[in-house]
Amino acid sequence: MSKSIKDLEMMFNLNFNNFQLLTRAMTHSSYAYENNCLSNERLEFIGDAVIDLIVGKFLYDHIPESEGILTKKRAQEVCEDALFNYAKSFNLGDYLLLGKGEELSGGREKPALLADAFEAFLGAVFVDKGLKEVYKIVEKIVFPTIIKNIHKEDNDYKSKLQELLQSDKRSLRYEIISESGPSHDKEFVARVFMDEGIIMGDGIGKSKKEAEQNAAFAALQKLANKKTGK
């Protein structure tokens, strides 16, 4: 059962001019379909653009490296897994309005659903209160994580593996080979193949994307060990 959306407003001291915008931001398409109302998809669209802008400006101010590094870093900090973690940090899933089926299938814990809801939340704040109020939320929820990770090595192992093998014109394919656990706490196992049939590595994760990244990391380790003769 969802918590009061009013509590979410109070958490960030937002005082919406049009409270319906915040309600809409918390309305998943499954609930909208069942109740003949508007979903959060349009607000998600504008929220995506807003967080791209704010995070891009923050990285521009804090990282002196080239455009390519900035672009990669921004992608890392606004990807689905990152947005999911931002949403989880203040239990955003508790405030969602979900359809009956989505509720029963553990929708409040689904990474993609929570990532979209976080964008919609920022979109609603932007439309109602402007960029300044969005900054207050991002400064509290997003910037501390970026600062903590700002000097960490890029963990986009899928891109690194692709770059390593593309000169040899090798193809890569990822496959989820198993999943286990309840809907709200699933664990996925991904496998990466080279040239269709060659198994390069397996990886485990709480989302399919995380499992694929870990499979790519395992493949990179395998290639590094082969190169050094280990």
Image (cartoon, grey):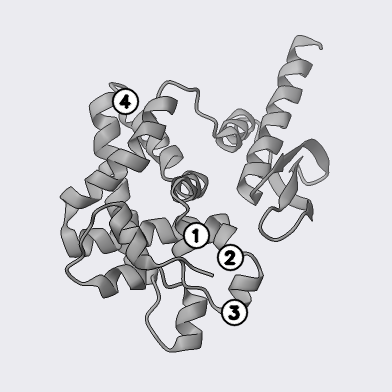
Q: Quadrant of residue 54?
A: top left
Q: Which amino acid does the dot numbered 3 rest on?
A: Lys
Q: Which amino acid does the dot numbered 1 rest on?
A: Gly
Q: Which amino acid does the dot numbered 2 rest on?
A: Gly
Mark 1 vs mark 4: in front: 1
- Above or below for 148 versus 120: above
Marks 2 and 4, the one that precedes in the sequence: 4
10 Å neighbourhood of mark 2: few (<14), some, or many (≥20)? many
Report the front residue among 103 and 164: 103
10 Å neighbourhood of mark 4: few (<14), some, or many (≥20)? few
Spot occupied by residue 18 in the image (x, y as percentages of width and height):
20, 72
- The secondary structure type at the circle numbered 2 is helix
Classify residue 89 as left or right of residue 198: left
Classify residue 177 as left or right of residue 116: right
Residue at 74% over, 15% down? 227
Q: Which residue is mark 1?
A: 93
- The secondary structure type at the circle numbered 3 is helix
Residue at 28% over, 21% down? 64
Q: Is the C-beta separation of discs 2 and 1 under 8 Å? A: yes
- The secondary structure type at the circle numbered 1 is helix
Q: Which amino acid does the dot numbered 4 rest on?
A: Ser
* Mark 3 vs mark 2, CA separation in Å: 10 Å
- Quadrant containing the N terminus is bottom right
Q: Which residue is mark 2?
A: 107
Mark 2 vs mark 4: in front: 2
The answer, for residue 42, to whether it is visible in the render is no
Q: Which mark is residue 66?
A: 4
Q: Which residue is mark 3?
A: 100
Marks 2 and 1, the one that precedes in the sequence: 1
